[in-house]
Image (cartoon, rainbow, N blue to C red):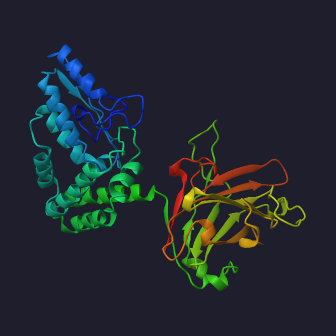
Amino acid sequence: AAYPTQNVRYPILSGDGAGNVIGAYTKDIWKRRFEQWGKAKAGELGYFGYYYVDGFNAVADTAAEDYRALAGYHALMAHTEGFSVDNEELSNWDADAIEKWVIAKLMWDPTQDPAMLRKEYIQRVYHGAEKEMTAFYQLIRDAWHNAPESVFVNCHTPASNVFRDFIINPGIEEKARKLLADAEGAATRPQAKKIIQRHIAYFEKLAATLGRISVPHVEESKNEWLEASSPHWEKAAVVQGFRQVSDWRDLGREQASRHPTTARVMHDRTNLYIRFDGMDDHLADQIKPPLPAGQVFPQGDRFEVLLRGAGNRDHYLAVGAGGHLFSQPSLGGRWKAVVSQEENVWTAILAIPLNVAGGHGEAHPAIKARFGRVYRLTGEEREESSHNGAGLFNDHPSFWLNLQIQ
C-alpha cells in the first residue's frame, strides 16, 4: 500500500511520486519497494491503491499504469475504495464517478485504455451532452497532468485544494463552468440532466470553499461610507453566518453564534470600507470605559479584522462598542472608524486605505482577510465568533477569506 507519501498524480514505477511531503524519503522509494516486493513475491502480491481523491481529477490514468505493473508481477489481487453515503446529499461521486467507474473496469482488465473507457462512460451517461462533457473532462485531465510537480495529491487532500490546484490555478474555472452549463442544456434525458446538475452543484460547492469574496467598487461610498442607513451599503459584498470559535475541547462543533454578526465590504479605489452589524440584546450591559486619548485595546464587545496583503504583512484592527480603536502595527490616523447603536444592534464602520490593506495601484491584488467578533458583557458571559468558526490567529491557509477587489 503506497500510503500516504505517494503522489497519486504519478504511477508508482515512474519514481516521481514520493519525496514531496517527507523530505527524508527519496523520490523513488515506492518504485523500489514495488519492484523489490514484486520480484520477491511474484505471484503472491496484493495491492491497495489509494485512488479515492475527492474532487475533479484524472486519477484513473495513474491507476491504469499501476495495475498494469501489478499484473506484470502476476499479482493475486488489487483493492481500492471510494464510496458515498446512500442518500440525497452531494458527495465526491458528483465530481469523479467517471474515474471510479474507469478504475473498476481497470481492476478487471488493466490492459484497457482509460481514455476509451471514459469515452464509453460519457456515451452511456450524458445523452445529448457528450460533446460538452468530453471537453469538460479533457480540461480536467490536461490540468491534472500539466500541474507543477510540487502539487501533491493523496486520499487525504481536501477537495477544495484539488479544485484550487486543477481548476482555479490553471485558469479554467469559467470555461469549465460554461461547459457544464451548456451540457445541462444539451442533455436529452432526465437522468443525464440530473447527473449534470449534481456536477454543477458540487462544482459550485467547491468553488465556495475557497472563501472568495468579490468586493464591489462603489464610488458613492467615498462620501456616504459613514452613513449606516445609506442605500449604497446594499451594494456591498456580504459576509454572514458567523460561527462560534471552538477550542481544543470541542473542535469542529461549528455552532452558529448566539449573537449573529454580519460584515459588509466595498471600496472606492482608495479605501476599503468594512461595516459590521452585531446583534446584542443587552446593549446597556456592554463594557464601555471612558474613551481615553490614543489607541486603546477594546476589552469589551468588539469587532476584529485581520488583513494580509502584499508581502504577507498582517494588520490587526479592533473596534469596540465604546468607540475604542486599536491597530497593530499601529496605523495612527491612517484609518478611521465610527460606532453607532440602534435598539438591539451595534454597528462599526471602518475605512482602511487600500494600500495599507494590501492593494496597490489600479490592479489591486486579492486581499486576504479574517473577520471576528468578541461578545462580552459586564459579567462573565463571553463568546468569540468568526466568519468561519476558526480562531482569528489560527493561520491555516484555508481559514482566510480572499477579497477580490473589483
Location of the N terminus (image quadrant): top left
The answer to whether 90 is drawn above or below residue 204 in the figure is above
> Based on the displayed image, in which of its 4 quarters is residue 164 positioned?
bottom left
Q: Is residue 336 among the parts visible in the rendering? A: no
Name the side, left or right, on which 3 lies relative to 402: left
What is the count of numbered marks?
0
- For the question of whether residue 96 can be seen, the reply is yes
Determine the residue positioned at 60% across, 78% down. 270
| Up/down of 290 relative to 45, above or below | below
Residue 19 is situated, as x and y percent measured from the top left of the image, at 37, 34
Relative depth, front residue between 44 and 73:
73
Residue farthest top in this picture: 40
Residue at x 36% of width, y 42% of height = 152
Percent from the top left, x then y, of residue 105?
Answer: 14, 38
Which residue is painted at 28% across and 66% down in the image? 175
- Determine the residue positioned at 41% across, 51% down: 160
In the rendered image, the vertical position of residue 88 relative to residue 341, given as above or below: above
Residue 406 or residue 51, whichever sits in front: 406
230 or 21, nearer to the observer: 21
* Front-most of residues 218 and 353: 353
